[in-house]
Image (cartoon, grey):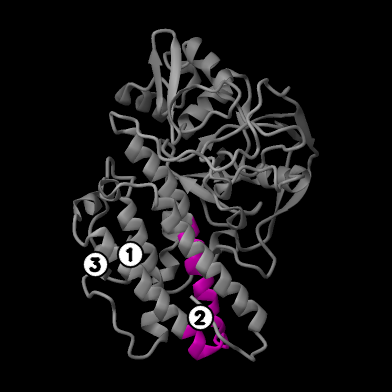
């Protein structure tokens, strides 16, 4: 995507958007570059989408919500792609059901790459035509890029699930750099205090945010304290060795049913061989790193571990208040997508791990804020209709782009899901 000239008042904004468009779209294809062709099509479980589908769906988003409504005489790349690559937008029309995405051996990966090139060229021409003077187009392109960044994280975790269920446990790639570096000993756990009081929650600035963050409102919080780092693999292993998965006293009723029905004994990707524990990472099959944050755990496991420790999880409001008070030295110490570690690391002193490494389960159900307003039409389906049977996570992970996260960002998943980079932060009342 390029822009040759513009003399509008939005020149700086548009040039920045063009740069971001190129960067974000390239990052998506870069994530897929280490894959073999066969890897692009596999769907081992319903929550995982094939990488080929992600590449096409993020492109369909730009085509459907920007090019079709705003570019006269735009010709769709393929009339069937709307049916194949619509995700869940009922307003847009019928679609392939989510569990059947892995059945789409056609169109081929090469066709999807051509689709991306075609739409990128059309977006380029649209910006040239409008010179950025249509604020709605600018806003929708930014939304499309934020949407694609969400799918970049899903791509990483879906690729990990695809390869992690391959009997060969293939290596995805060797990391380009290690930042922050692994450490050889456990940092002491300290607890940071937050005073009782009234705190403002929600996003109120002029930059981009999702609609579920909107509506600054006040909440009263009792005094509490929270750990200045995430729970590690070694600490979680103590829970396993103590019989944590065999004692119903630690578990919510739904969680205990989940443990029994699925014969759960450890986090996802953990395997016991003789007396040692291994896990699959995107660097391959490895011994557990005891001082790295535990990840790929469900809300049920996070809650059970906290109870076993005599602690609890933060609420999402406590997390946001704590983050705003203590999220010092976010960059460059945080471990994000661009570091290409794709593995949680215990941060060095001075980084409270409020951002990056692992999404933190909170003890808050995903519900609308007091002033939440659902957008009309298909884009109103983006967040609002999922505000049921889900728990909120905060902070981002090692697969989250650094410019995609903020203290008000609300991620959400059902309580049984493990395939994301999810972790634990302990808290307690004062």
Q: Residues within 10 Å of mark 3 (few under 14, many from 20)?
A: some
Q: Main secondary structure of the magenta part?
A: helix
Left or right, 187 with reference to 90: right
Q: Tell which of 338 and 87 is nearer to you.
A: 338
- The question of residue 195 being in magenta is answered with no
Who comes first in sequence, dot 2 or dot 3? 3
Q: Which mark is residue 113?
A: 1
Residue, x 54% and y 20% (percent of image)? 236
Who comes first in sequence, dot 1 or dot 3? 3
Q: Secondary structure at mark 3?
A: helix
Cα distance, mark 1 to mark 3?
18 Å
Residue 114, image x, y percentages: 31, 69
Q: Which mark is residue 83?
A: 3
Q: Secondary structure at mark 2?
A: helix
Who comes first in sequence, dot 2 or dot 1? 1
* Residue 336 makes an appearance in the image: yes
Q: Which residue is mark 2?
A: 137
């Amino acid at each position: 995507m390029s822009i040759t000239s513009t003399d509008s008042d939005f020149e700086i904004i548009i040039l920045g958007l063009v740069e971001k468009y190129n960067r974000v779209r390239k990052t998506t294809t870069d994530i897929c570059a280490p894959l073999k062709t066969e890897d692009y099509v596999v769907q081992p479980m319903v929550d995982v989408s094939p990488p080929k589908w992600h590449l096409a769906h993020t492109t369909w988003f730009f085509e459907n919500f920007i090019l079709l409504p705003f570019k006269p005489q735009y010709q769709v790349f393929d009339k069937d792609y709307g049916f194949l690559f619509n995700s869940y937008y009922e307003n847009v029309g019928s679609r392939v059901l989510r569990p059947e995405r892995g059945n789409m051996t056609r169109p081929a990966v090469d066709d999807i790459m051509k689709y991306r090139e075609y739409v990128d060229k059309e977006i380029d021409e649209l910006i040239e035509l409008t010179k950025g003077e249509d604020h709605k187009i600018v806003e929708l392109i930014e939304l499309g890029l934020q949407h694609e960044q969400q799918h970049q994280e899903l791509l990483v975790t879906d690729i990990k699930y695809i390869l992690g269920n391959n009997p060969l446990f293939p290596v995805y790639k060797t990391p380009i750099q290690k930042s922050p570096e692994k450490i050889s000993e456990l940092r002491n756990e300290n607890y940071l205090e937050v005073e009782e009081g009234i705190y403002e929650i929600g996003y109120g600035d002029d930059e981009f945010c999702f609609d579920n963050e909107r509506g600054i409102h006040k909440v009263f919080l009792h005094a509490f304290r929270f750990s200045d780092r995430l729970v590690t693999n070694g600490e979680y292993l103590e829970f396993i060795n103590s019989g944590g998965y065999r004692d119903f006293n630690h578990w919510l009723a739904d969680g205990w049913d989940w443990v029994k029905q699925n014969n759960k004994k450890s986090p996802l990707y953990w395997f016991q061989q003789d007396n040692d524990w291994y896990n699959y990472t995107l660097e391959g099959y490895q011994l557990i790193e005891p001082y790295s944050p535990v990840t790929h755990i469900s809300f049920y496991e996070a809650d059970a571990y906290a109870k076993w420790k005599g602690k609890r999880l933060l609420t999402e409001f406590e997390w946001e208040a704590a983050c705003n008070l203590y999220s010092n030295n976010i960059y460059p110490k945080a471990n994000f997508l661009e570091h290409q570690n794709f593995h949680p690391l215990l941060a060095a002193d001075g980084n409270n791990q409020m951002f990056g490494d692992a999404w933190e389960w909170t003890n808050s159900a995903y519900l609308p804020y007091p002033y939440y307003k659902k957008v009309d039409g298909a884009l109103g389906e983006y967040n609002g209709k999922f505000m049921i049977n889900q728990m909120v996570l905060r902070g981002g992970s090692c697969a989250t782009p650094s410019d995609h996260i903020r203290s008000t960002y609300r991620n959400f998943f059902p309580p049984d899901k493990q395939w994301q980079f999810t972790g634990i932060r302990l808290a307690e009342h004062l």
